[in-house]
Amino acid sequence: MNSMRPTFAIVLFSVAAAIAGYLGVNIDFAERGGTFVDIVKENYRWSRAGEGGELSAAEVDSQGWPVVDARYVLDYRPVAEWNGDIDDPEVYRVDMSGTYKCSFTGSAEVRGVSGGSVAALQYDETTNTTTFDFVVAGPPGDNHGFFLIDFTETKRIPESSTGSGFTDFKMYRPGYDLSTDKTFTDEFIAALTGIRFSTIRFMNFSMTNGRDPDYPGVTRWENRKRKTDASQSRIDPIGKTDGGSWEYVIELCNLTGMDPWINVPVSADSEYVTGLAELFRDSLGGSLHLYVESSNEVWNTAPGFEQSLYNQAQADELGIGEHENHARRTAEIAGIFREVFGEDALNNRVRVVLCSHKPMLKWWVVPMLDYLTETVGPPEEYLYAIASQTYFGAGADAGESVADILAQCREAIDAQIDETGETDEAGRVQWVATAEEYGLPGGYCSYEGGPDHGGGSTDNIANRIRAERDEEMAAVWTYNFDEAFFQVGGNLAMQFTLSSAYTRYGCWGLTDDITDPERSVKYNAAKLLAEKYPAHTTKPEKMVRSAVSQAFYITVLQKRVRAHFSLNRSAPVTFSLSTVDGRLLAEKSRRFPEGTHEFDLSPDERSGLSPGSGLFIAGLRTGDGIVYRSFIYSR
């Protein structure tokens, strides 16, 4: 007997047709294999020459450059080779070999202490510039990527005393000359644009986590990271704990044509938020949208997320709950961006997203939306969307096989889809329904998602990493974002991250090498999914509440397809079958009362709905919205 097998048969909430899923990505600082042409921009690690020990505030200038003899440290070894134990069973190493073109302002004796050798050292007295090559041998072997470079007998200017340091050190990756005007590596841009991402989230790039002072301290616009600072990484000796400058965020988005998603520091004062909004208004490409979020995970009290402590302390002073303060702060930021961009900017060019922990839908999110309703007005006037994380993981128990891990990953995803009747009631379909209920034009988004096999434990680490590289992970990864997110009504989904090492601390990246991204099954899966869900190019429409209130799924009887659904009120219903390219195969309409129903459709065999013919789309339309499900027709 011929039958149609649905891609999944789970009770699913509906979503109006105005919301369509698309894929974005979080980028790291820095990508594994490189983000910047100048490696110094992504690494700030200076110690005292010949003796170690990080440089103090008294040993650097206002931009972070050494004012003493110093040693530059780079370490790209796999975790945790420095302790004689490597997590990755493949022992994969990014190839760091080649000739690095280097220069700095001032003079010095320069010596390669580890990982490479110095060649062609020259000083030009007329320009007070020193140039040299740092040569790294290949192919990668033990401790490859661990570089120590000593700068001694330093003089900032010829008249300076010996040991006065230097400035403007550059170290360009192999293949790039010091005369290049490129900021980002060709390999990074190729990997980023090789997938049709709509949006880049810069939370890690701007180093949002743990960057704020203790409350009531504030972060001021004039103290932000500048392109001219000694690095785009944290520069602790001068108190610059933020990451990449906002100017580089804008440059990357204008170059790639992708929308930026930025995280405003929880401690940023109103002048900072205004300056940030003005910078993006004046510099971001006119066709690009701007997603705006207040900090990152202010609910997260783990070490490294001290922004949660700031939010709690501020809430205590204001006499409100910490979740209410997060909502208040988000609305405050939205108001400033509206003032800068113009009255009609919110939910059009500027899209403010209220984020929270996935289990906290009815404990934090709904109370936050109600708080905004009571204090500033309807949330839909300030907020584009609500968002949570969409991670999955397994395999922490010793002895679990790769197959077991992948099966448990699917189970973990399934458990997140619908939590009707459970304690939290925070399944993805409940998030979709909540966004719909409050009329948010961007619906439900995912600010981060993908495999989570971190935590720091080495238990079963080899198989946890092997699972990431297994062919089945491509299907599991796709299932998490497609059937279990987009197809249940999710909107923008942000993969975390583009690249990373695969270690006990996580296997977050779509690839583990930005210079060879397609070695990863996850990268290739993301490429296919992004083609299926291209980015929005038009103004988002407001969500419409559908009469389909609880479920729509497909089963198949001999020679007919059956839709199962529920209505929250009497409504006309149209049941349709189409090809994936939009060709209508069959359609039938009738009115149903409130309640649970079944609706059969018997397509003509000449329609093209034949055994083994592939993927089809079932649609269920009421007067105010349509819900889709895909299914495969097979024997």
Image (cartoon, rainbow, N blue to C red):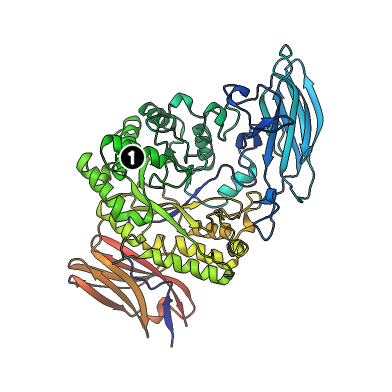
In the image, taking residue 307 as reference, residue 526 lies left or right, namely right
Instruction: Tell me where residue 337 sits by quadrant.
Output: top left
Instruction: Tell me where residue 217 sits by quadrant.
Output: top left
Of 457 and 245, the residue lying toward us? 457
In the image, taking residue 170 as reference, residue 549 lies left or right, namely left
541 w.r.t. 569: above or below? above
Q: Residue at x 66, y 21 (%)?
A: 67
Per the image, the residue denoted by label 1 is 330
526 w.r.t. 205: above or below? below
Q: Residue at x 42, y 64 (%)?
A: 484
Residue 566 x %, y %: 25, 70
Q: Which quadrant of the figure contains the N terminus?
A: bottom left
Residue 593 x %, y %: 17, 71
Residue at the extreme right of the image, as rendered:
120
Q: Is residue 16 visible?
A: no
Q: Residue at x 38, y 64 (%)?
A: 417
Of 403 and 459, the residue lying toward us? 459
Graded by Cα atoms within 10 Å as few (under 14), some (14 to 19) or many (20 or more), the crowding at tag 1 reads many
**Count of labels shown?**
1
Residue 475 x %, y %: 52, 66
Q: Amino acid at mark 1?
A: Thr
Instruction: Tell me where residue 595 sits by quadrant.
Output: bottom left
Mark 1 residue element: helix
Of 4 and 162, the residue lying toward us? 162
Residue at the extreme top of the image, as rendered:
159
